[in-house]
Image: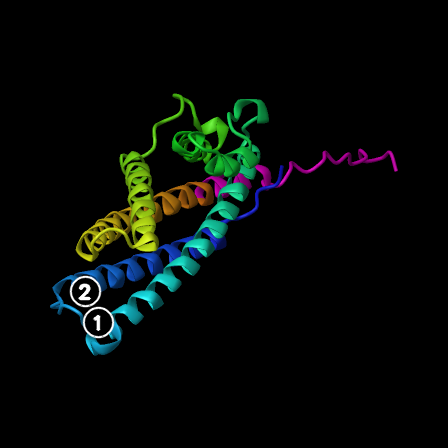
Amino acid sequence: MRYRSVHGRAQTVVVLLAITVVLHFFALLTSVIAMSLPTAEGVEIEDDPMRLLVGLFEIGVGLLQFVTFVATVVVFLMWLYRAYENLPAFGHWRSSIKFSSGWAVGSFFVPFVSLVVPYQAVKELWRKSEPANALTFGESGPPSFFPLWWGFWIVSNIVSQISFRMTLEQKAPADITNVVAIASDLLDIPAALLAIAVVRSIDRRQTEASQQVNVQFQAPPSPPPSFQPAAGQI
């Protein structure tokens, strides 16, 4: 199996996650401003220029967040699939790899399974993103921010779903909806920052591993022996 660099995909994921952080910051700021605006009985939002402006800004940021989220998910899964495909190039037998590339990606979409298996797959990817002959003392565990990332990812997704449903149904008071939206953004920001650290960590390990593999396999072979006729035999 030939190694194929996924550095470009990893960099794209990092950029999209950075944009996600910025958008959540603006969404957080907008929610705080919306909560601080005075409300008047019987006044429609169309008659309040400030509330109308904040509402339009919220819609614009929300649309950008949705587009960025979809793009991030697509590119992240493309990166994850290709990075998993690189593991045999580092000397790991297919039979020693617990998760296939397809299952590492597909597990994100299976209810209940998505709470555990994707994290296990990402941990395995980190561990095996190193030449097999370098694992003299066994596989080491990933950095401590890996479980932090997954914890924030799970909780932020749950709160985001609650916030989305409250906004869509519009049954809860506006203040409560804004509080939940603020909590969602406060969780999404560290989740995205930790995801950047995870992607960079795996990408760095695979880049370093590929250089070690190239040194091993690209070493020039020994020259064939040459047989020179002895003097007087020509």
| Secondary structure, magenta segment, majority class | loop
User: Residue 35: x, y in percent?
Assistant: 15, 61
Point out the residue furthest to the right here.
234
- Residue 192 in sight from this viewpoint: no
Q: Which residues are magenta?
A: 208-234
**Image disc number at residue 34:** 2
Considering the image in quadrants, where does the C terminus appear?
A: top right
Would residue 167 appear left or right of 104 to someone viewing this image?
left
Q: Are marks 1 and 2 in contact (CB under 8 Å)?
A: yes
Query: Residue at 46% of width from left, 31% of height from top?
Result: 128
Query: Residue at 72% of width from left, 34% of height from top?
Result: 225
Would residue 183 appear left or right of 11 to someone viewing this image?
left
Residue nearest the viewer, comparing 20 with 174: 174
Residue nearest the viewer, comparing 145 with 209: 145
In this picture, is 8 found above or below 218?
below
Task: Report how many numbered discs are placed on residues in the image.
Answer: 2
Q: Find out whether residue 184 is within the magenta segment.
A: no
Query: Residue at 44% of width from left, 57% of height from top?
Result: 12
Q: Earlier in the sequence, mark 1 or mark 2?
A: 2
**Image disc number at residue 51:** 1
How many C-alpha atoms fall within 10 Å of the one at disc 1: few (<14), some, or many (≥20)?
some
User: Residue 56: x, y in percent?
Assistant: 31, 71
Residue type pointed to by label 2: Ala
Residue type pointed to by label 1: Arg
Query: Residue at 49% of width from left, 55% of height from top?
Result: 8
**Image disc number at residue 75:** none
Report the Cα–Cα distance between label 1 and label 2.
7 Å
User: Residue 227: x, y in percent?
Assistant: 77, 34
Residue 153 lies in what quarter of the image?
A: top left
How many C-alpha atoms fall within 10 Å of the one at disc 2: few (<14), some, or many (≥20)?
some
User: Residue 213: x, y in percent?
Assistant: 53, 38
